[in-house]
Image (tube, rainbow, N blue to C red):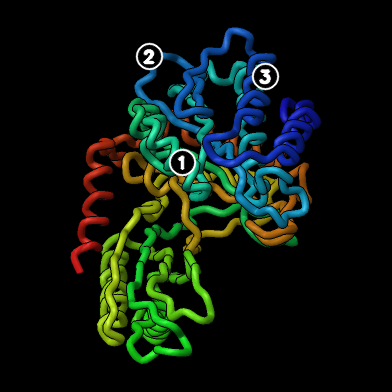
Amino acid sequence: MYFKNNYDDIKNIAEKIYYQPELGYKEENTKQTIVDYLTAINPDINMNHFSTTGFRTTLGNENAEVNIAFIAELDAVYAPSHMYADEDTGAAHNCGHYTQVAIALSLYNYLYQSKAYKDLTYKFTFVFVPAEEYLDLEFREELMSQKKISHYGGKPEAMKLGVFDDIDIGICVHAIGGEFSKRTIEINCDLAGFLYKKYRFKGKATHAGFDPFSSINAYNISTLFNTAVGLSRQQLRDEENVRINPIVMDSDMSTNVIPNHITVGTDLRTKSVDYMKEVASKLDVAAKGSAIALNGEVDTKTQMGYLPFIQDRYLSEFVQQAFHDNNEIEQIWNNNAISAAGDIGDLSYMIPCIQIGYSGFTGTIHGDDFIDIDPEFIYEIFPRFLSQVIEKIDGNIDMSRMYRRTYQDYMEVIQNIVKDTDQI
């Protein structure tokens, strides 16, 4: 009855966050809403704060050898045309993070009020992480210049700060895009990794009418590059779910002057790091070749995004067991890879992680019309299901199948990706 009795409060919190969206590392109101709720439940709660708006709190025996994290993301997307976007910031909750937070609070309420956490053989740590969405980068670069953060993404920043050093397993949940006729969960949905490439094509400016003959048209070079990218797509492996999206980053041009510079940026998404490096090298060759073909030059810059996320299949078995014992959720999806990305991929390099998907929405995820339509499922039934997953895991984890890498290991991988893709 805990989930049913707490349903209205949880739904109200979710709606409050939904209608007050905030971008990453700026989630002050969101954080305060969560803190107020948790403190009302547990006045003696102990919270550890990190990276502007992040914090964590633990339930369970402090002497337990295993610590499992339930991770919720605080931030919204930049989507100023969304029907409920913030008029000043353009932030909108069209990725479903507001429901993650509500689900985490429902689960905390159950574990604490029922005292079920006292029976667990492991510690259960709730981690509320800022800045999962990779955007608003100028603001984050300013934070970096002030030495307030070191990473664009909230989970890598938390990794650097040691937030996950005592965590053995990470569990996250996420909205599934699209509408479903049946209440559905999803497991083993792998995500792509991505990096950014920026190409600054350089030419020679002249009067477009009087003397185009001695010019070197940087815009034409970028057009040739875009053509090369399009023609090269047939060489890219289908199973790697490659996504490339070149856009013009600056366009300081006049119709009567041949442009002498233009910057093209693209993200590059793949399922594996090795293939990311391979395709990045092909893009660099296309950029360099396009510049040479039209007597221009190109400067190349690589910026790492997030690592691919390969879900831990062993941990997902406990979710599948709970689903088979559950009579409230009708359908389970399994082993669907998509080209979306998330910084859960970075954390999964360090410790084993799973991300459980849940239906209950309408509209396009990250679209202008995204909103939940089945709050009973999202805020009552699904959290109750997660409590059943927790019961399945308790005392049954084979720790020999777990792994741990350090933040330093992670940074070596990231630095090598950027280094290897800047060799052309």
Residue 346 image point, x, y percent = 37, 46
Q: Amino acid at mark 2?
A: Asn
Residue highlighted by disc 3: 36
The quadrant where residue 17 appears: top right
Quarter of the rendering occupied by the C terminus: bottom left
Residue appearing at x 21%, y 56% in the figure: 419
Cβ atoms at labels 3 and 1 below 8 Å apart:
no
Relative placement, left or right, of 362 versus 27 is right
Query: Which callout, 3 or 1, points to the residue nearer the camera?
Result: 1
State the residue in front, 23 or 397: 23
Residue 370 image point, x, y percent = 72, 55
Cβ atoms at labels 2 and 1 below 8 Å apart:
no
Circle on res. 140: 1
* Whether residue 98 is visible: yes
Q: Pointer 1: residues within 10 angstroms few (<14), some, or many (20+)?
A: many
Query: Which callout, 2 or 3, points to the residue nearer the camera?
Result: 3
State the residue in front, 195 or 251: 251
Q: What is the number of callouts on the image?
A: 3
Sequence-first disc among 2 and 3: 3
Q: Secondary structure at mark 1?
A: helix
Residue highlighted by disc 2: 63
Q: CA gap, disc 2 to disc 1?
A: 37 Å
